[in-house]
Image (cartoon, rainbow, N blue to C red):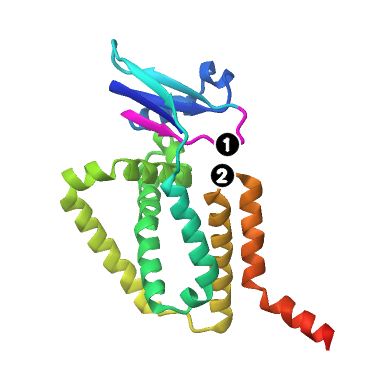
Amino acid sequence: QIRVTSSRMIRVTQVDSEEELEKFSLWNVVFSFLRGKLNDTSIDVDLYSNKTCLKVELLEPGTDYTVVLSRRFDPKLFLVFFLGLLLFFCGDTLSRSQIFYYSAGISVGLLASLLVLVYMMSKVMPKKSPVYFLLVGGWSFSLYLLQLIFKNLQEICKSYWQYLLGYLLSVGLLSFAVCYRYGPLENERSINLLSWALQLLGLLLIYSGIQIHPIALGLVLVAVCTKNLDYPLQWAFAAYR
């Protein structure tokens, strides 16, 4: 992990190569105004990446900053790995659980409401406005907003807790009403599709939670074999008989 700390607000930009540091791009200029200005930024580095380039822009003269490279155990990756194990081995049970159905529906509603907001803003914006072209890429813009919100979640909860509570209650109740209207899945094929989707997502999270790719692939294979161990044993027993 690369950590950049400074005495005042700075803007840290990560790029793929040194050439992009000096290359002018309209999108880079637009996104530079949208990026959060922080005095403590952390960038996770892939163990298999050949090179990681970053640019530190000083917003105020006389700003001192330090760049520190650290190697440590990341609890976030462990949580991702553990969540992947939970989804893969408990996907059958979760796909039939009403508690999981309503909690997942409310969570998706809270996140998807941001996409709806971006869509409504794109309808209001003039067609020739530069912001309109930014809103057309609703997925990337929404993902950026989610990342910005989670990065400043503590400050938002402290300063704007009334608005946050109102948003969670209103959108959560609306999402619950939609889930209650359609009800949990009852068709066996739909339940199987949801179970397979959860297991596939679990495998992806298991692979993403381990930074050493061969070990991650090996753990995925072990999980698949463990999950379906009864079938090879049944085949071997039938062949033996």
Q: Where in the figure is residue 23, as x and y percent of width and height?
A: 54, 18
When the figure is inspected, residue 152 is found, relative to residue 235, above or below; the finding is above
Which residue is rendered at x = 22% and y = 41% of the image? 155
- Residue range in magenta is 38-50
Q: Where in the figure is residue 158, as x and y percent of width and height?
A: 18, 45
In depth, the one of 111 and 220 nearer the eye is: 220
Classify mark 1: helix, strand or loop. loop
The amino acid type found where label 2 is placed reads Gln
Which residue is rendered at x = 66% and y = 73% of the image? 228
Of the numbered discs in the image, which one, if any, rests on residue 225? none
Q: Residues within 10 Å of mark 2 (few under 14, many from 20)?
A: some
Q: Are marks 1 and 2 in contact (CB under 8 Å)?
A: yes
Real-space Cα distance between discs 1 and 2?
7 Å
Q: Where in the figure is residue 230, as x and y percent of width and height?
A: 67, 78
Residue, disc 2: 211
Q: Is 45 covered by the magenta stretch?
A: yes
In depth, the one of 128 and 47 nearer the eye is: 47
Q: Where in the figure is residue 191, as x and y percent of width and height?
A: 53, 78
Residue 123 is left or right of residue 18, and the answer is left
Q: Residues within 10 Å of mark 1 (few under 14, many from 20)?
A: few
Can the viewer see residue 31? yes
In depth, the one of 10 and 83 nearer the eye is: 83
Based on the displayed image, in which of its 4 quarters is residue 18 positioned?
Answer: top right
From this viewpoint, which residue is outermost toward the bottom?
241
Which residue is rendered at x = 18% and y = 50% of the image? 161
Can the viewer see residue 129? no
Of the numbered discs in the image, which one, if any, rests on residue 47? 1
When the figure is inspected, residue 58 is found, relative to residue 236, above or below; the finding is above
Classify mark 2: helix, strand or loop. loop
Q: Where the C terminus falls, by quadrant?
A: bottom right
In depth, the one of 139 and 12 nearer the eye is: 12
